[in-house]
Amino acid sequence: MFNIKSLPMAICLGLAALSGSAASASAMAGEMVNPDGNVVVGYWHNWCDGAGYKGGNSPCMSLDDINPMYNVVDISFMKVYDTAEGRIPTFKLDPTVGLSEQEFINQIEQLNQQGRSVLLALGGADAHVELQKGDEQAFAEEIIRLTEQYGFDGLDIDLEQAAVTAADNQIVIPAALKMVKDHYAAEGKNFLITMAPEFPYLTQGGKYVPYIDNLAGYYDWINPQFYNQGGDGIWVDSVGWIAQNNDALKQEFIYYIADSLSNGTRGFHQIPHNKLVFGIPANNDAAATGYVQNPQDLYDAFEQLNQQGQPLRGVMTWSVNWDMGTDAGGRAYNEQFIRDYGPYIHGQTPPPITSNEPVLKGIDDARVAHQSYFDPMSDVTAMDDEDGDLTHHITVEGQVNTSSVGTYALTYLVEDSDGNQTSKVRSVDVYSSKPIFKGVSDTSIQFGSEFDSLAGVSASDEEDGDLTTRIEIYGDVETNRLGSQTLLYSVTDSANQSTTVERTIRVVDESSCAAPWQTNNVYEGGDRVLHDGTVYEAAWWTRGEQPGSTGQWGVWREVTDAGCDDTNNGDNGAGDDNNNGDNNNSGDTDNGIDTGNENGDSNGGNGNTDNVTEWIPGQTQASNGDMVSYQGSCFVAKNNPGVWETPTQSATWFWDEVSCP
């Protein structure tokens, strides 16, 4: 453990003492190497045989195998290996990489002697870093311990996804790193602090901004990850949306995202251009998206930034292992990344084109239609300065089955007479357009009419043509039942792609006995009207509310008959068999008209309602057992009806119809 009490008071102010035995170890530590000029940063895997996004492999490698043009190497990763051991991250050398602890330390020292910096990267995609307030000192002590043990020159914050905001990481990590930097500053050393945020977290108020702000004046550079972010990107006025995975606009993306970060514009937080390092994957296996297919795109974008006086600090890549990895066919990537960008970044001039390897052309990702013909060699060529045309020597590994929709990988390989090989991986997407329907639209039909659910309906797609005979219909339309009914139409093409649409059929009766709805009329519960070919019944008193617009729980409900029953005739609904709606107040006993029938049956119309309390919507509160009159009939309350539970509408649940006294 290490004692910071001996640091000057200006450094130690506010810091608790770190414990004891490090003074001598610190004095023995070598000088920390800080790179001069531009940087090419490469991450080193502390594990073996990582699987690639395109089926390739990233091998184990020693530090002394790393190309010397990588002048910054980030060791991946410092993390929590076992939560049972505590929450302070640490580093453990994986023995499967083939290095002993001492060999690892010696190789770091060798890189330092070459003027190359070696940093410890904190986090990674599978990190379990969840520091809490109060962990600052313990975390700083562990960083110093590892730095003294292995000879690291700094630390890179490589937290991703949930770990960025987990627990108190945004506060604890910057505070601890300040302690570490101040500790080594007292010894005349600069402990490098860098970061590798996923670029969407760099917007104003983004998740990584607290790290940048809390370490302002302390961090040395930031190398954002401009990969694995799918269609995320940047909006540029007069240009539009530029997605990170849009290879056709790669040069524009590199320029505008770097310009936005350098100047704090277009919604992004500012990172000074001389502290901005552009992070891209080494190849298509290293990341799902973000690989720069044509290095000239980066050269051109960097040149634009140079012209405006804002050159960047360099480039970063994931990873040195992938740069030395192999593709799905076992073909080496041959350190193509460092060959493309090392000479350029360190000399700011594009590297010369080497002529000792064959050059493959025409191998671009492709999209082909389902069931179409695909020739993998169409427009593909191979040339070599010494052998000339080598197209006939190209071998292709993999197959494309255009009978099955999906994405296929092809690996092209060519070898010249000197044994020099070139390989490229190509992605071929077999696609099929989904079926489309015509004639499937909502419609109204007349009550009692015939209806053919396939009349005027067709389905087709670009590849199969007419698919009408494959249409399946779920549901039936009962034309003797008024109201809306639903049909589902489904069709599947030869690529097993399905399209399903829903259709609403409204059965209406333009000849309904119910009177047309009038805007200014007053309607009471049980009244029926005709509107847009559909019969509706009012649940309670209403005026001016259009049928069909009040929703499932509104005043108007669709009914499934034509409105010609004896008690609901389209006016106020009450009256004897001969009334036919002529008497708009047939339920009012004050007009002297007997609204009951003459037979004295139990429909509630017999007897006299004069001595029974009249039920008035919104006013009458009846208790269980109370008798009320409504529209010339009598009802007894049950189940505690509310003031809007109309007797005629809510009968059987809240009301029992009875004979009037």
Image: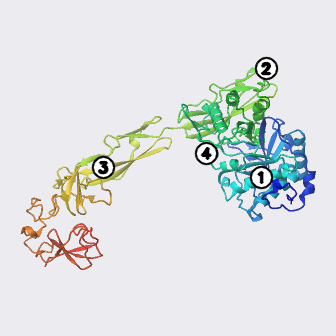
The N terminus: image quadrant? bottom right
Mark 1 Cα within 10 Å, few/some/many (few <14, many 20+)? many
Amino acid, disc 4: Gln
**Residue 637, percent across and down?**
24, 76
Q: Distance between the residues labelled 2 and 4?
A: 54 Å
Give the SS element for disc 3.
strand
Q: Where is residue 574 in the image (x, y as percent from the top left)?
A: 14, 64
Closer to the eye: label 1 or 2: 1
Mark 1 or mark 4, which is nearer the start of the sequence?
Answer: 1
Closest to the observer, 175 or 580: 175
Q: How crowded is mark 4: few (under 14 residues within 10 Å), some or many (20 or more)?
A: some
Q: Name the residue under label 4.
A: 204
Q: In which quarter of the image is residue 538?
A: bottom left
Instruction: Pick whichever, 251 or 257, lies toward us.
Output: 257
Which residue is rendered at x = 47% and y = 35% of the image?
Answer: 463
Q: Residue 386 carries which label?
A: 2
